[in-house]
Amino acid sequence: MLNVSSSQWFELQERLSAIEALRVLKKRHTYEDLSRMLNLPVSVLNRYVMGRVVPRIDRARKILKFFEERFDLAKEIKNRIKFDKTGYFDNTPIVFDIPMLKLIVKNVIGKYVNKRVSKILTASTDGIPIAALFASELGVDLVYAKKEKEVGIPEFLEESYIPSSSGVYVSLYLPKRAIASNDRVLIVDDIIRSGETQRALVNLVKKAGAKLVGIFILIAVGNLWKNYIALQKNVPMDIFVQIEPPT
């Protein structure tokens, strides 16, 4: 690991966040538009967006200030949520947008750098993109529980529950060697509704004998999940966007 001070680390995150902010803005504006608005040459902006050059800190802060004045990440996510008549929504415009997810992760990752996280845990499949970005930022392994056992894996940890919306058992399986007893685990997921899946993940961490250091949720729908997760009083839980279900 590079030997850098805390201030250097946060400055580097700001500089990298500026690149992700430009990538998000580039989906809506041409280079010529951005050049005019930021008073920066098109060639320079292109090198930033392509990742060939990292902006210096003063320029990065200028880009981030410009971005924050025009683009609210939480509001953007809410605007992309369109409930159907069943009370569910298509989350692909959110979980498929990697530049936006990268920027969200860079905005919140500072909360976890000193927690000595050694594993990121999620449930397949839609939580994987943002969980993978957390793992990449922290330089740790990503593990995820599946609803099926796979051949070739000798032992699994298993957690079963009955979703409130159905009358059948659902099981999550995690390879037994995926999490060790000395791991410090951060659970990351894209959406929480009832909290049943996340509680199952919490129980898998317990069965592994590992330490749960936090839970990060991108979108929380309603408050029903609090009945299941509120019991984890010693575990910090971060919600990026809270929305109400349709009435």
Image (tube, rainbow, N blue to C red):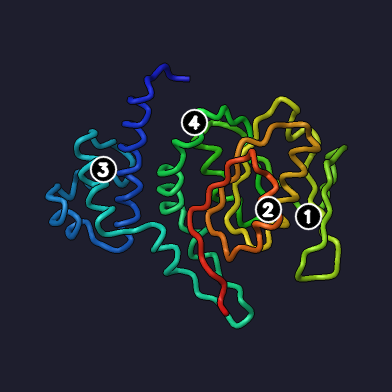
Q: State the CA–CA distance, disc 2 to disc 3.
A: 35 Å
Asked whether disc 4 touches disc 1, contact meaning CB atoms under 8 Å apart, the reply is no
| Res 84 quadrant in image | bottom right
Q: Nearer the viewer, residue 104 or 136?
A: 104
Mark 1 vs 2, N-terminal side? 2
Q: Which residue is mark 1?
A: 147
Q: Which residue is mark 2?
A: 124
**Residue 187, position in %: x, y?**
63, 43
Amino acid residing under circle 3: Arg
Task: Report the disc number at residue 126.
Answer: none
Q: Classify residue 128 as left or right of residue 196.
A: left
Task: Report the disc number at residue 47.
Answer: 3
Dot 4: element: loop
Amino acid residing under circle 1: Lys
- Figure check: 82 above or below 229: below
> Residue at horizontal 69%, vertical 32%?
211
Q: Which residue is mark 4?
A: 113
